[in-house]
Image (cartoon, helix red, strand yellow):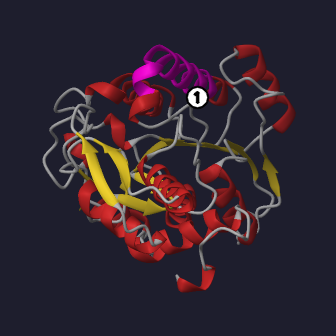
Amino acid sequence: MKFWKNKRVIVTGGAGFLGQAVVGLLKQRGCQHIFIPRSQQYDLKKLSAVKRLLKEAQPDMIIHLAAVVGGIGANRENPGKYFYDNLMMGVQLIEEARLCGVEKFVAAGTICAYPKFTKVPFKEDDIWDGYPEETNAPYGLAKKMLLVQAQAYRQQYDFNAIYLLPVNLYGPGDNFSPQSSHVIPALIKKCFDAKLKGDDHIVVWGTGKASREFLYVDDAARGIVLASEKYNKSDPVNLGAGFEIKIKDLVEMIARLTGFKGKIVFDVSQPDGQPRRCLDTSRAKKEFSFQAKVKLEQGLKKTIEWYIKGHDESCPYEEGRL
């Protein structure tokens, strides 16, 4: 509570999925001066907007969560946009924060920055051991450059910038748009819609053999806030739950939780993405005592309940069954 008293904080992306969870937790911890820039007023790709934001907000800390991001399909369709937008937002914001004397910069990177064939579990020291998975490499590399910038600025300017690597997030409030959603909301929507329409099957991209790790959004927010309070080193830090699950098993779990009993068809003509994802989370535990608390099935139930509440009550679902 003392740490955040009178501290002025910008949270980019603060109105988004992860950002709302971070802002809510900051308020719980006593932060009273939170500035959330909206893209309509502050286009962070433009230097003039970044300068105006810092002049108006006069922050002591910036937590940079804003990103242009989507699933495999969206990454394949927008490689140039995802590279440019994410790079320009982060690079200009860090530079102007340094020039304005901001005390601390917290950069949220991405699991997509890791090499395609990283040894499991992913250790932070492995991040430069190869090229990222091709379908999301432009996005991953753009966000990875913020790590380079943070380390370079600490070395030359003694600028306190830290870099976090959250794994795939999910939870209530996630993006369920078919055009840009990630795997968990996409699968929930597929199963929900199929049951609602009486379809006898759903189609899932890939072979189902790839594995992923998932972190509940409230856990991710807690990790970011803890790092903001306690971590002040140049080394990147993973934020994860410390487990992996094959996509095939994930689909079957979501089908069971939503009550979809039809067939699951894997479209092997579509890419799997990175073969495996699972993080070594020991550094976060050692440096700022972070460990995930929400188990996957528990988090999925909460996410599905939230999604169902957003639909007509006449749909063939019973909220209490979860």
Say whether residue 82 is magenta. Answer: yes
Q: Which residue is drawn at 26% across and 63% down?
A: 249
Instruction: Establish if 14 lies above or below 6.
Output: above
Tag 1: amino acid: Ile
Indicate the position of residue 298 as horizontal and vertical percent values: 46, 77
How many badges with numbers are in the image?
A: 1
- Residue at the extreme right: 56
Of residues 122 and 246, the one nearer the viewer is 246
Q: Nearer the viewer, residue 205 or 301?
A: 205
Quadrant in the rendering for residue 6 = bottom right
Query: Which residue is drawn at the image coordinates 51% and 34% (left, top)?
Result: 69
> Residue at 43% across / 27% down in the picture?
75
Q: Can residue 295 be seen in this view?
A: no
Please, what is the dominant secondary structure of the magenta stretch?
Answer: helix
Residue 10: horizontal and vertical position, in percent?
A: 72, 43
Quarter of the rendering occupied by the N terminus: bottom right
Q: In this view, does 195 lie above or below 205?
A: below
**Magenta segment boundaries in residue numbering:** 75-95
User: Depth check: 231 or 196 in front?
Assistant: 196
* Place of residue 40 in the rendered image (x, y in percent of width and height, measured from the top left): 81, 28
Q: In this view, does 180 lie to the left or right of 31?
A: left
The residue at 64%/57% (across/down) is: 173
Splitting the image into 4 quarters, where does residue 20 fall? bottom right
SS type, badge 1: helix
Is the residue 193 above or below the residue 77 in the image? below
Closest to the observer, 294 or 220: 294
Can I make out residue 8 in this image? yes
Q: Is 205 left, or right, of 178 in this rendering?
A: left
Is residue 225 a member of the stretch shown in magenta?
no
Number of other residues with Cα within 10 Å of mark 1, as a class: few under 14, some 14 to 19, many 20 or more: many
* Percent of width and height locating residue 245: 25, 62
Q: Mark 1 points at which residue?
A: 94
